Image (spheres, rainbow, N blue to C red):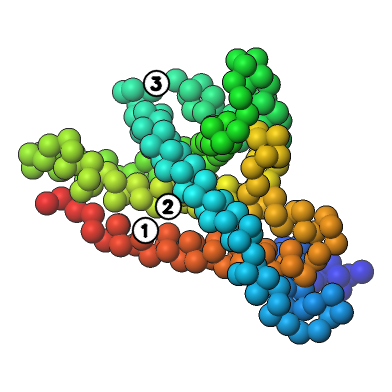
Amino acid sequence: MRALMRFFMRRQNWSLPYFIFMLIFVVLPLVLIFIYAFQDADGNFTFDNFSKFISSPEAANTFVYSIGIAIITTVLCILLGYPAAYILSNRELCRSRVMVVLFILPMWINILVRTLATVALFDFMRLPLGEGALIFGMVYNFLPFMIYPIYNTMQKMDHSYIEAAQDLGANPLKVFTKVMLPLSMPGVMSGVMMVFMPTISTFAIAELLTMNNIKLFGTTIQENINNGMWNYGAALSLIMLVIIFASELFSDSDEERATNEGGII
């Protein structure tokens, strides 16, 4: 018992529970997805799961359509979220902290509850459920995930750069494009990843807001796994993981380039 207490009293061992948690709930599922993706139903090594995806027009079209919906949702969230984050971070425009809480409040509510509320809203207004409702629901659900990282970055921004640009005679547009936007780019790219990744993989929102008439890639994965097609579902999941990983690398490089290009010119 004393040896166990001495073990946990060492500061370098405090991270052990988190390491075990990551190993069981993150690393192990990813390893299983990778293994299942390259196996058939009998456990033999094969590439047939990926060939099936490539040769299936329905799966490929669903994949492309899901990426399109994710891009549209992300762009709309940027267009709506950036001005909102700027207003919330500007003390002259927003003096009440209550406004910040109201914008962030949806993040504390379960996404399924918010989606059901959107369905009730469309039903109350007698609007049809479909692609428009899907995009509206996506933006409504994921907009706070765009606002918060941008707002957080703007709160920590060194405003002396903005003041210096104004003193040098830069107009508001140049101040924004040369100073403010590059400085806020880390928050923008974090918001992009927080919106794009769940949008491309979600299935509950599409099912509820389109009455299951529109399938996203996440819906295809869910259907295959529910029907016992674990190997094909794992292959689709692996494809999605590759896309997410590639978008993460792109966002990191784009963020670094935008930050390096920022300056008062």
Residue 61 horizontal side relative to residue 50, left or right:
left
Q: Which residue is mark 1?
A: 255
Residue 132 horizontal side relative to residue 258, left or right:
right
Does residue 98 lie above or below 237 as drawn?
A: above
Residue 4 horizontal side relative to residue 35, left or right:
right
Q: Which residue is mark 3?
A: 95
Earlier residue among tags 1 and 2: 2
Give the Cα distance between marks 3 and 2.
Answer: 27 Å
**Do labels 1 and 2 touch, CB within 8 Å?**
yes
- The image quadrant where one finds the N terminus is bottom right
**Dot 1: within a 10 Å radius of its alpha carbon, few (fewer than 14), some, or many (20 or more) residues?**
many
Give the Cα distance between marks 1 and 2.
Answer: 7 Å
Q: Position of residue 186 (x, y in %)?
A: 40, 52
Amino acid of disc 2:
Met
Earlier residue among tags 3 and 2: 3
Earlier residue among tags 3 and 1: 3
Amino acid of disc 1:
Glu
Does residue 71 lie above or below 103 as drawn?
A: below
Q: Position of residue 92 (x, y in %)?
A: 31, 23
Residue sticking out furthest to the bottom: 45
Q: Position of residue 156 (x, y in %)?
A: 38, 43
Does residue 140 lie above or below 56 as drawn?
A: above
